[in-house]
Image (cartoon, grey):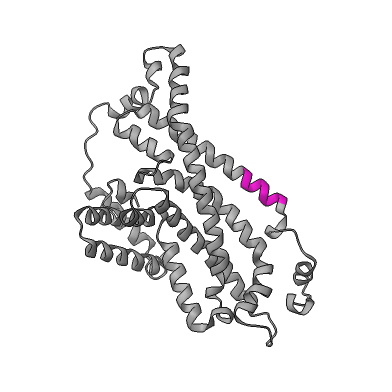
Amino acid sequence: MLGFIGLPTLGFQLDSFFRQGDYGAASAVMAIYVALIASIRLWMRWRLALLWVLAAVVSLATLKSPPMGEGALWRFLTTDIVPAPLRTGDWAGFADWLGRLLTTEMLSGIAATIICAQIALALTGMLAFFSFGVIVARVAGRAGAVAGHLVLVILRSFPEYMLAYLFLQILGPSMLPAVLALALHNGAIIAHLVGRQAGAMTGQLRPDAPRGATLWGYELAPRLFGPFLALCLYRWEIIVRETAVMGLLGIATLGFFIDSAVAELRLDRAMVLPVAAGLLTAAIDSISRLVRRRIGPGGSRALPHEARLRSGGPSCTTAW
C-alpha cells in the first residue's frame, strides 16, 4: 500500500496503470497481489527468513532516494512543524491559529470521519452476520463452502485503501467507495473468523441436526452472536482509523485535510491534524473496550442454554 505514496511496490504499479488507462495491466497487478497473499504460507517459512531479510537489505540498498538537502531534517524538526505564530514568538496568535484550524478543518474532518465510519461499521456487521455461514459445509454444502471461503479470503486480502481506490475509479469521488471498501474488507474478516468457529461447532452436533438456513438461523447464529458482536466492536476502532486514511483519496475525512496541508507545504497544520485523528481513534477504542466489558465474557451476556453448552450440556436444538 505504500506504493500509493511513491514506494515502488505493487500499489505504485497499480496506481500508474490506472492513471495511464491500462486497465488490463491493472487487473494483472491485482491478480499478482492476490496470488502473493494467498501463497504467503508457502514461501514465508522460518527456514527462508534469513534469505528474505538479506534480499530486503539488498533491495533497499539499490533504491535511490531523493536528496533531502543539508540540514533538511533539522529544519523540519525545528521550523517546518512548529506552528506558524510560534515561529515569530506570537504566543497570543497561537490560540487564534489553532481555533481557525479547529473550526475550518478539524471539526468537519472528524464529523465526516465518524459518519463514514459508522455507516461502514453498520454495513460491515450486516455483511458479516449474513455471510459467515457460506463457509460452513452443513449450511452451504461442500462446493458452496469452498466457493464462499475463496470469496471471503480474497476480500479480506485486499486492503481497504486498495478497494477504495478501485471503487473510486468506478463510482467517482464520494463517501461510497470508502464505505464499500471498509465494509467488504472488514465484513470478510469477521465472517471468516466467525464462520471458522461455526464450522468447528458443527462437528459437535448430533447426526440428525438440521442443515442449511435452519441450522444457521436456529443453531449457529444464536450461539455465535456474542463473539460476532465482540469482533464488530474490536474492528470499530480500526474502521475509524482507516476512514481517516481514506481522505488521501479525496474523501473529506481527516486524511483529506492532512493531504491538503502537505500539498500546500503547511507542515505545521499537517502535524496537528494527525493528533486529532489519534485522539479520535483512542476515544473510539476506549468506548469499544467499555462496551465489550459491559456485554460480558464471550461477547454477550450468557444465556441459560449457553451456560449448559459451556458445561457440556445438550445442544440448543435439544434444549429447545
Q: If the image is split into quadrants, where does the C terminus sit?
A: bottom right
Question: Looking at the image, which residue is at 42% across and 69% down?
Answer: 41
Question: Looking at the image, which residue is at 44% across and 33% down?
Answer: 273
Q: Is residue 290 magenta?
A: yes
How many numbered marks have been drawn onto this rendered protein structure?
0
Question: Where is residue 140 shown, x and y percent of the image?
Answer: 54, 79
Question: Which corner quadrant of the image does residue 65 belong to?
Answer: top left
Question: Where is residue 32 shown, x and y percent of the image?
Answer: 30, 66
Q: In screen coordinates, is 320 left or right of 95?
A: right
Magenta-highlighted residues = 287-294
Taking the view exactly as shown, the residue that stands out farthest to the bottom is: 208
Question: Looking at the image, which residue is at 55% across and 55% down?
Answer: 122
Residue 17 vs residue 41, the one in the foreground: 17
Q: In screen coordinates, is 171 left or right of 297?
A: left
Question: Which corner quadrant of the image does residue 86 belong to?
Answer: top left
Main SS type for the magenta part? helix
Residue 122 vs residue 182, the one in the foreground: 122
Q: Is residue 113 magenta?
A: no
